[in-house]
Amino acid sequence: IDVELYIVGDLAFTAVVLGKDGMSHSWCPMCKMRAAEMPNLNATGEIWQYAEMKKLGEEHQKKMRLFEQNDKVSPPKAQLGCKDTPWWPFIPVERFIVPLLHCLIGIGDAILTKFREEVSEKIEYLSPEEVKTRSHLAELEVKQAEVRQEVKDFDVSEKGKELSSHLGKVGRAKKSLKKLDTCTNGPGANTISVKNDAPVSVLLFLQEVTDF
């Protein structure tokens, strides 16, 4: 069976397995580009070959052994970030995959920010105040969605149902008091007459009070 192997890991892990432990902040683990050159999105680096990384890694290890044997020798500096030989040279560098989560929270965020800056500068100019306001608006929309969900969760909880019951009782009490006010202050309230519907309203009110 022909099996293709791939490696998924963050930049620190990739640097370690390629023999560049601790150098991910200074060099690209996949190519010969320095970290200082990376902000230039148009820049491209030469992809590493395993033979080159192995040679530089072996040279650095040889210098490290000399340094450990003779403390008068200055500690060697890694060449192009190579400090050791790669772990798995049988897996092509092209098959190293960047985790999607890291794309979203790290690289993707930087790319999106740069894209917005390009759009703001060359297509639709936005002042710093507008950019800041839009950012805050997005944060508020997220917070609003969270609060709405909290309200929904509370409504279906025991305390939420209890509050809903109390609000219903208050509403029915207000409605009954309004009917009583109509019976006592409305036309014909001070007279006793069969034609007057006040006694019926009073009876209905008393019944609602009893139910309440």
Image (cartoon, rainbow, N blue to C red):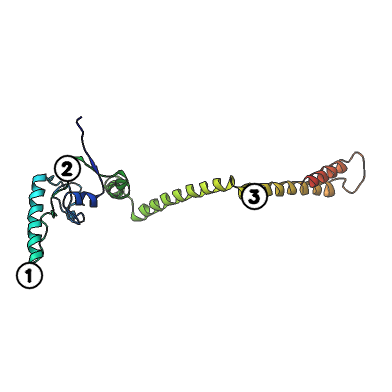
SS at circle 3: helix
Q: Left or right of 103: which side holds 53?
A: left
Q: Are marks 2 and 1 in contact (CB under 8 Å)?
A: no
Name the disc covering residue 93, or none.
2
Residue topped by disc 1? 72
Q: In the displayed image of the protein, which residue is found farthest to the bottom?
A: 72
Amino acid at the residue labelled 3? Leu
| Nearer the observer, 68 or 93 | 68
Q: How far apart, in angstroms, are the residues tagged by discs 1 and 3?
A: 79 Å
Q: Earlier in the sequence, mark 2 or mark 3?
A: 2
| Nearer the observer, 71 or 145 | 71
Q: Earlier in the sequence, mark 1 or mark 3?
A: 1
Residue 110 x, y percent position in the rendering: 28, 50
Residue 27 x, y percent position in the rendering: 17, 53
Q: Residue at x 9, y 69 (%)?
A: 71
Residue topped by disc 3? 163
Quadrant (top left/top right/bottom left/bottom right) for the N terminus: top left
Q: How far apart, in angstroms, are the residues tagged by discs 2 and 1?
A: 38 Å
SS at circle 2: helix
Amino acid at the residue labelled 1? Lys
Q: Are marks 1 and 3 in contact (CB under 8 Å)?
A: no
| Nearer the observer, 12 or 205 | 12
Pair 2/1: label in front: 1
